[in-house]
Image (spheres, rainbow, N blue to C red):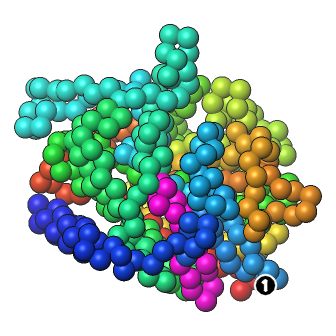
Amino acid sequence: MRLHALFLQGALSLAAAATTSSSKIPSPDANGKYWLNTTRLSLAFIPYGASITNLILADKHGKPLDIVAGYDNATAYTLDTAHPHFGSVPGRYANRIRNSSFTLFADDDSEEETITYHVTPNENPTPSHPQGVDTLHGGPDGWDYRNFSVVAYTNSSITFSIVDPDGKEGFPGEVISYITYTVSGSTWDIKMVAIATTKKTPIMLSSHTYWNLDGFELEDALGHELWMPFAGMRVAVDGILIPTGDLQNNERGGVNDFWSRPKQIGESFEKREKGLEGNCGTNCTGYDNCYLNTLRSSPSSSSSDWRQPSQMIARLSSPHSGIKLEVYSDQDAFQMYSCNQQKGDVPLKWTQGTDERRTIPKYGCMVLEVQDWIDGINHPEWGRTKKQVFAPGGDPYVLQARYVFGVVDE
């Protein structure tokens, strides 16, 4: 309870300070962006979805590259009907919710009385369910469709806030959240705090950043090398990527083996390995999988292989640019998406691409989402309730992640 009180006190103090001094917060640039800078990194953010829009650093040749997908102007994020969730914070519950529903124990913590909630669907429409059969990233008006407030801003840090009202998209209770981005040297730190103020409710957030460490100069990102040393298992899903409740081994040498050694994303494509087709859903070839950050190897590993919170959970690098990215997080899962649905119809920013290449192609990027086990609210057998369901007076939801950038030749 003390931890909750400290977070709540700090959050309310920050909100009060923002209310009285919001006029002192500098305005964004002409494109609606707020920039954070170090001697090695330049990052830009917008209030819409608390999204990162640019991340610029020098490659091995000293050439500055913008390595995240987005738009040149903040207004474009609100106009794109496809809404690819570029760089945003999806909420109040990231990833997919089966059947757009979940059941919670009553607010008095009785294990006999339960309440079933139905949230707004927005994915996989059918004739009988024209809105969809599941809910993705919080619904059709989830957090990354909304403008956050800027409550604090310096050259090295920015804090966004959102108040999500009771009943929005069908979720119970009000939630107050603060998203803080901080840069220092070659490091970008993320801290997300969310507090349930009126009712018990599920909360799971993430950063939905699209990466291309070559600044989209090449035809695709399949040459990127990925290593996830603790991803010995993944969540099994059906053809529309809804968890079945099963957990699958990532067999050594198989399509989903990124734990035994660093591997190029496209290695299994080149070898035409069995299992790649359908790996990301029906009629989908590639990756859109939730890997678990718990075991160093397959489930036969000894208990000594369990990850510590301070350890690196993923490393992404590119031989072309020499840029590498190391990810550290306190979260227990990691969704990797290889941009299988890109069609070459999304324009690049003026800071990206080449004269001949001006759109994002299929497999032209990667999304690396730090989060908890997806749809854990519908699988109590996984024991994720304390990580995903929060109540007034209890501890807040907290996500912390650190992205450390470098150049391979350094």
Q: Residue at x 82, y 63 (%)?
A: 353
The location of residue 93, given as percent across then percent down, is 39, 43
Assign a secondary structure to mark 1: loop
Mark 1 Cα shell of 10 Å, populated few (<14), some (14-19), many (≥20): few
Q: Residue at x 26, y 69 (%)?
A: 19
- Looking at the rendering, which quadrant does residue 410 occupy? bottom right
Quarter containing the N terminus: bottom left
Magenta span includes 44: yes
Q: Foreground: 101 or 82?
A: 82
From this view, report whether residue 364 is shown above or below residue 129.
below
Say whether residue 258 is visible.
Answer: no
The location of residue 125, given as percent across then percent down, is 55, 21
Q: The residue under label 1 is which amino acid type? A: Gly
Residue hosting label 1: 62
Q: Which residues are magenta?
A: 36-52
Q: How many marks?
A: 1
From this view, report whether residue 254 is shown above or below residue 67.
above
Magenta span includes 104: no
- Looking at the rendering, which quadrant does residue 376 occupy? top left
Q: Foreground: 360 or 240?
A: 360
The location of residue 293, given as percent across then percent down, is 47, 54
Say whether residue 214 is visible.
Answer: yes
Q: Residue at x 71, y 57 (%)?
A: 263
The location of residue 389, given as percent across then percent down, is 26, 44
